[in-house]
Image (cartoon, helix red, strand yellow):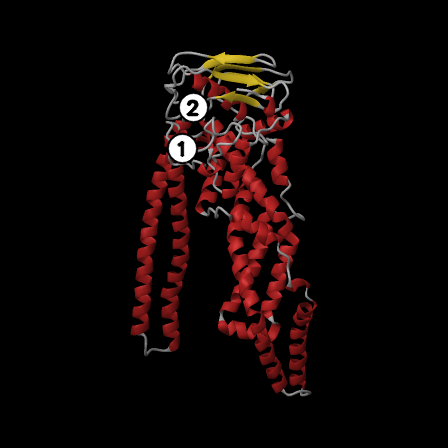
Amino acid sequence: MENPKDWYTQRIVETEDYLHKTKGIIFRISMLRVLFFLAGIAGIIYFFHADAWIITASICCTFVPFLALVKIHNRFFYRKVWLETRQQMNKNELAGLDNDYSAFDEGKEFINPNHLYSYDLDLFGKKSLFQAVDRTCTPIGKKALAHWFNNHLTDKKRIESRQESVKDLSKRKEFRERFYITGTITRGKENDEEEIRKWSDTSVYLSDALWAKIMILAVPVINLLLLAGGLSGIFSFKWLGLSFMCFVILSFAIIRRATTVQESFGEKLKSLNTYAKLISLAKQEQWESEELKDLTAALNIEGKSPAEALERLSKELDRLDLRNNQFLYVILEGCLFFQLQQIVRIERWKKQYGKYIMNWLEAVGKLDALCSLGNFAYNHPTYCYPEISDRPFIFEAKEMGHPLMPEKQCVRNDADIPSRPFFLIITGANMAGKSTYLRTIGTSNHSIFRHDDFIGCFSADKIKKFVRKYFCFNIPIYKNMAEEPSCRSPYHEEYIQTSASGNPEGLYH
């Protein structure tokens, strides 16, 4: 069995070596850039009165390599950021193995005291189960994971399918690392999902406008006819010049619209490109899990992957950026009414692919959340995957421990709830671990089976259970298991009860 601590330690050492070499290369490239730039300036001054070809050759021999080195420097700088992120990631994971989760998101925004079980079980907040599990690199993945924590699943086949996905991902540590780093370096905004949804739902305007279609066709045709007439002597070239200027002036009417499209699409493209990169990483894998196979296969649209579709949008936006050059703006608008053409092409892209964008984001969120669960499973190789029973009601656990308890402090216990209805009274002295025992059962029940499943593995030698809609318990005093393994409450009893009806309204504590 592979030791996660050895793997993270090895990655830290390797990354430190690569990072040292990369920083050295960046330094040498920077020095070369300075030398080429100074040599170019010196060459211009020295050959100022020489022939033009000598000055041109001097510039080509100095400033062309300078520009090439700028591009190379940017690549190595991105590599440096990548390695720094990888190094920090592995250091954080190493600390997490020692129950130090301070580097990870607490999920405070998901704390809900009114929730049926999440508040009592410390699912969110400081040193919570969410903080121990969450390794998402996208806002939508984080929300998906939190949703799974708060909404459990009761379908056996879907639970087992999700367990297979978690097992598959737990074995792909290099993929999970690349996925996390890619998303972290270009992490989007927390409201990305909402903004992109609104943007994708807004209707297009110019691509369906009749006047726009007429102008796109008429402008180049009129210019070609006037040019041909001028060359053949039928018309004066003045008419061509007049039409050219008229079209340039008319183009001013859509400058604001073009700017809006350029800014809104450009901003969304940055976020979408990040998600497309993550999808591309997933599609490169040969998955064993049927759920992951179906998830990645369903992303293709008309034979194209999201990355290919977004690359097309990127090219269209790059062409629209030509309008920022004033000289090119006049030429292109006078000849082709270029702005309008590009806006229509971009709106057609949105019309074709916009309805699929939210499916792309949902897939990325699912993959991101699954990577967190796979990472949790990898970090705890001794944890078991519960067996889902077809016989109601059963809950059997051997050597069960709470996942937030440090290994040295964790006292493992068995649990046996053989039927329903069934009633247990847990009593004992203060500091005896009554609340810890109840929370361990509650966590093993609710934290393993969420909407579309949650972890799929748990701190125990064996767990066998039948999935119920509700599994309720009462812990009168709130406490954090990572900080307070027990509490000093005078003489209280704590109860755990399974529901025969599945109706929480009928339960009592």
What separation in Å lies between label 1 and label 2 (alpha carbons)?
A: 17 Å
Let me know if residue 382 appears in the view: no
Residue at 41% of width from left, 36% of height from top?
104
SS class, disc 2: loop
Classify 10 Å Cα crowding around label 2: few (below 14), some (14-19), many (20 and above).
few
Amino acid type of the residue tagged 1 in the rendering: Lys
Amino acid type of the residue tagged 2 in the rendering: Ile
Query: Where is residue 201 drawn, in percent x and y?
Result: 62, 52
Classify 10 Å Cα crowding around label 1: few (below 14), some (14-19), many (20 and above).
many
Horizontal side of 375 relative to 217 (left or right) equals left
Give the vertical position of 372 relative to 71 (above or below): above
Residue at 55% of width from left, 64% of height from top?
320
Is residue 156 or residue 1 the one in the foreground? 156
Query: Where is residue 55 drawn, in percent x and y?
Result: 36, 73
Numbered badge on residue 477: 2
Horizontal side of 256 relative to 89 (left or right) equals right
SS class, disc 1: loop
Sequence order check: which comes first, mark 1 or mark 2? Answer: 1
Is residue 345 or residue 454 the one in the foreground? 454
Residue at 56% of width from left, 59% of height from top?
315
Labels 1, 2: front one: 2
Give the vertical position of 192 relative to 262 (above or below): above
Give the vertical position of 114 relative to 423 (above or below): below
Query: Where is residue 112 drawn, in percent x and y?
Result: 49, 34
Q: Quadrant of residue 92?
A: top left
Numbered label tally: 2
Numbered badge on residue 324: none
Numbered badge on residue 126: 1
Query: Where is residue 456 drawn, in percent x and y?
Result: 54, 26
Let me know if residue 483 appears in the view: yes
Mark 1 and mark 2 residues within 8 Å of each other at the beta carbon:
no
